[in-house]
Amino acid sequence: MEMETSEDWEYTGTEDEHIPIDLFCSKEDARVPRGTLEFTNASGNMVFKVQHQPPNPKLLLDSNDNPLFSIHHRHNGTWKCYKGNGDENKELVLKVKRTLKTISRVKLKVFFAGERLNKGVCDLKVIGSPFMRSCSISKDGDLVAQSSLMYNLIERYPSRDKFRLTIFPGIIDHSLIVALFVIFLKGRK
């Protein structure tokens, strides 16, 4: 019996493309100003930041404070996400419509801009409980991302101020997933 060596097989991708990514968020962090939500990686480095200064829309910023998306809430249970800063004349990226709102559950349908938006074809679904900071984001039945509270073994009841967003490998931009999660958190209103 002959053993395989490293020369017998070829690796065609990077390790990172097959590993889920965790982003962490804490509302208890004293260094984060009120009205700002920061998402950090496992090393504690800020990756994304969400700023909200009423009446302006929410802005999703990268780690260098460059605006990635502006999130506009409509009173009819819909949201629109535009590229860049808060100007609605920018390129529309996606539209989100709330299809279910109960005390404990919210369901959202996500439509990416383009021909599919005009045809009403749903691209992603978000289902969960904003109160518990837990949701599942799926595409055609496949899990794209999920969120949950950060549990501590010594706590009887977990704090709702610390939570995790796990993004699974795929073709959807991480910043879009974070924008959807921010919309989900506000989906109960």
Image: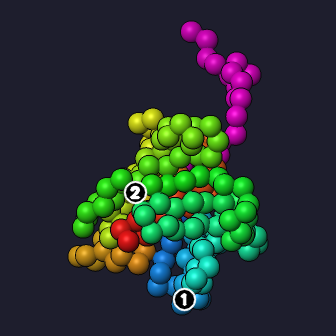
Q: Which amino acid is tagged 2?
A: Arg
Label 1 and label 2: CA atoms lie apart by 27 Å
Majority secondary structure of magenta residues: loop
* Residue 119 image offset from top left, x and y in percent: 53, 36
Circle 1 SS class: loop
The structure residue drawn at horizontal position 69% and vertical position 21%, both measured from the top left corner, is 9
Q: How is the image coloured?
A: rainbow
Which residue is more in the foreground, 108 or 20?
108
Residue 50, located in which quarter of the rendered image? Answer: bottom right
| Image point (72%, 55%), residue name | 91
Image quadrant where residue 157 sits: bottom left
Q: Is residue 106 above or below residue 169?
A: below
Magenta segment: 1-21
Q: Is residue 5 magenta?
A: yes
The vertical placement of 18 against 181, above or below, is above
Q: Residues within 10 Å of mark 2 (few under 14, many from 20)?
A: some
Element under label 2?
Answer: strand
Q: Magenta includes 143?
A: no
Indicate the quadrant containing the N terminus: top left, top right, bottom left or bottom right: top right
Q: Which residue is mark 1?
A: 34
Estimate the x, y position of residue 61 in percent, counting from the top left: 68, 70
Query: Is 36 placed above or below 87 here?
Result: below
Q: Quadrant of the C terminus?
A: bottom left
Q: Amino acid at mark 1?
A: Arg
At 64% from the left and 52% from the top, the residue drawn is 93
Q: Is residue 166 visible?
A: no
Residue 64 or 83: which is nearer the viewer?
A: 83
- Relative side of 114 to 78, left or right: right
Whether residues under marks 1 and 2 lie with C-beta atoms below 8 angstroms apart, the answer is: no
Image height of 100 relative to 162, above or below? above
| Residue occupied by mark 2 | 98
Instruction: Let me know if residue 33 appears in the view.
Output: yes
